[in-house]
Image (cartoon, rainbow, N blue to C red):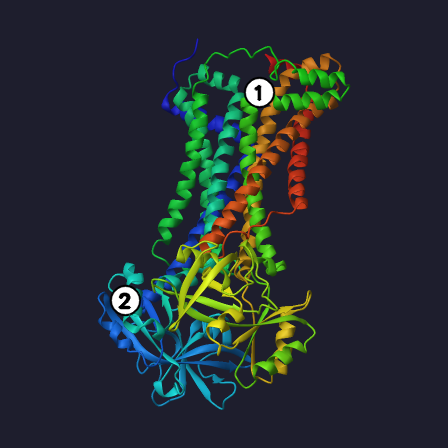
Amino acid sequence: MAAGPLGRGSGVRGSLRWAHSDLRAHRGEVLFLVLATAGIVASLLLATALFGYATNPWQRIFTQARGAHVWIHTVPSADARATARLDGVAAVAGPYRTESATVAVRGTRASVELRGTPRLPSVGRPLLTAGHWLDPAEPDGVVLESSLARALLAEPGDNLTLPGSARTLTVEGIADSAEPHYSPDQPGLVWALPSAVRSPGGQVIGLRLADPADTDYAVQRAVTVLGAGAVGEVSTWQQARSAAQGDNRLLGQVLGLFGLGALIAAGFAVHGAIATRIRGHLRDLSVLKAIGFTPGQVVRIFLLQHLAYALLGSMAAAALTEALGRRIPGRLGDAVGVWQGLPGHTVALSVVPLGAVLFIGLTTTLAAWRAGRVPPVPVPRPAAPVGGRLTGAARRALGLRLPAPLVLGVHKACAGRGRSLATVARLTLPLLLIVVALSAWTTIDRFHSHPDRMGLPTALTVRSDGALDASAVGALLAGDHRVAAAYPGVEVAALVPGQTGTIALRGIGTRAEPYPYALAEGRAARGPDEAVAGQGLLDLLDARVGDWVRMTVGDRPQILHIVGRSIEPQNAGRVVTTSLDTLRANDPELTGAFYQLRLRPGVDPRQVAGALTRAGHGHLDVHRMTNPADGLSPLRAVVAGLIAVLALIGLVELLTAIGGGVREGERDVLALKAIGMSPRQITAITVTATSCTALAAVLAGTALGLPLGRRLIDAQGGSSGIGAGIAQYPSPVLLLSVGLAAVLGAALLSALPAGRAARGRLADTLSAVA
């Protein structure tokens, strides 16, 4: 007869003694659970930091500067002030006269926009970080936008030269701005006094709107008032924000996705560990019930145990992230440093670990509930073997004289289908996520090793300052044996239908020597009026391959037939590319503004860039093409860390499966010894069963992870404008190595406990059977 319920004090002491003895018996498993939880929570905290880092700096600058929601570049003769009278425009910046120029300092050059600013504006106000604002006493003084200053390594007091002229400009200050930052494809912003803008080629005006949601409508109205032929380029606050967030948001998404996936995998691993432990300790649980433990007390033992482990891991992750996070090299460390200064930092530092603990607690409760239902009187274990009778296939395999341990091990792995499938499913999840992570790693590596397949067939862009004509530049490029091909090109801003924004219209290559597009869909543009477009452009225009699209360049309409979709990593994919011949047919006076160079294999672009710069005697601007993967380098370390965390979770699940398999196989040891099997053969049965389980999980994880990884990467490429088609599968050798490591690891881990059980004393075996 069962004893009465234990008193509160006795129940607490008994629970503590049970928890302590269980901890001593499963130290390794507890350590792995704590480490896995710490890795998961650290990943989620870093993802939170990256999201805050991606959004907050730009938003802070935009708010403090009272940034303009729309910037419109027009021809000098346009009446830009008329846009200030449009409905919904709350304030304006400018108009300011602008001049396109090239500046150089200490051998570094950059394309810039000189903006004549008579006074510090109230809308789109530059936020000074160094130096001072423009002084009328220094007519050649300028203020550089901070990203341009970093690219030029310029500081207040430096002198900038304008190649091709005798002019010099003095850097008076450096300022942050919410406008698009400098890049080789985006001119840098330089504020100067109106007297320093000597050859204005246009003007720019900024519109601050009462309702930012009306941005597209405001652009449309402004273009209508100014006239499409007067508008050169339009940029909006959404584009600037997206460009500022850049790769940080992607890193945050990757960390968040894998962190949540790892958390789910860890929850299932904890659930499986408790369920397996309950099956192995039915007699102990019955004894606990018999001595007075209530079902609620038994459930609380398991629940509090694993909540303590999860809490320990979460607190360790939070403490380490808070103390050492900013010391992580590169962007992750910068993100943590910025995040720690944000208002929501303390809340996130508490909510993320608490959420992980609660999730693990939920999965623990579901499994521990079964422990509370164990009857206080031990139920005799079934006499039949766990695997049941041999199947026909197993008997035939034995008849073919296949090794008995191999046949019985496979049979044991396949028997008890519900339980075996649950084990395989729990082990499959971390393996599936590892395959997805390896796909992300391989895609980033392909951007570096084969940029031509990822939308970057050329390595360098060459522009002349006008002192060298096209024939001289062409001859100079043709004379360098390291240059495989030079494609003349021009890029202009074009208004999209509806006049709600501008896109990049690029004419590059000729029909005789076409540009080598990286196509993901359709075919290359070969005939007149044919073009290829990036995913961002197709999404913007709601168009598909095969459609005709109309755009406006100045006051000239351009109608193109989209025959293919190219992988376009620049300008958020809002690029339509055709041949230079097609653009010249519409504008015979159009000439190439730059050359894009395809180099021979194995050539260092930096050496070629230096040689061409010297050969041009200062009249050539040579820039390397921007590779999106350059900003994703920190992702490799992130992926490696995530793989380690997932491997740890898989190891926990594997140890759980091994422990459960060994305990359930103890009662078969007498029967196997009775038919003449040696301890080595009995051990081989358990090792084979565990290896088969791991092999099934590897096959399932690979089969599910490859298409899932491709879909997730292509979805990210589509949302960023690059477009689907960039995902790459890991190499078969890498997948085979991961699979072999999982299977061999399972075999090695199971060999020791299986051998110990097979060599157990007869009394121990009899007690396990009883």
Of the numbered discs 1 and 2, the one sitting upstream in the chain is 2
| Residue 6 tag number | none
Image location (x, y in percent) of residue 517: 57, 61
Q: Amino acid at mark 1?
A: Gly
Image location (x, y in percent) of residue 301: 44, 27
- Calculate the distance from the C-alpha at mark 1 to the C-alpha at mark 2: 70 Å
| Residue 416 tag number | 1
Between residue 261 and residue 551, name the one nearer to us. Answer: 551
**With respect to residue 323, does 769 lie above or below?**
above
Label 2: which residue? Answer: 221
Between residue 564 and residue 448, name the one nearer to us. Answer: 564
Farthest-out residue, top:
1
- SS at mark 2 in the image: helix
**With respect to residue 440, does 267 lie above or below?**
above
Q: Residues within 10 Å of mark 2 (few under 14, many from 20)?
A: some
Specify whether residue 39 is in view: yes
Residue 499 position by quadrant: bottom left
* Relative to 376, 676 lies left or right: right
Image location (x, y in percent) of residue 84: 24, 72
Q: Residue at x 52, y 82 (%)?
A: 465
Q: In the rendered picture of this protein, how many numbered marks are placed on residues?
A: 2
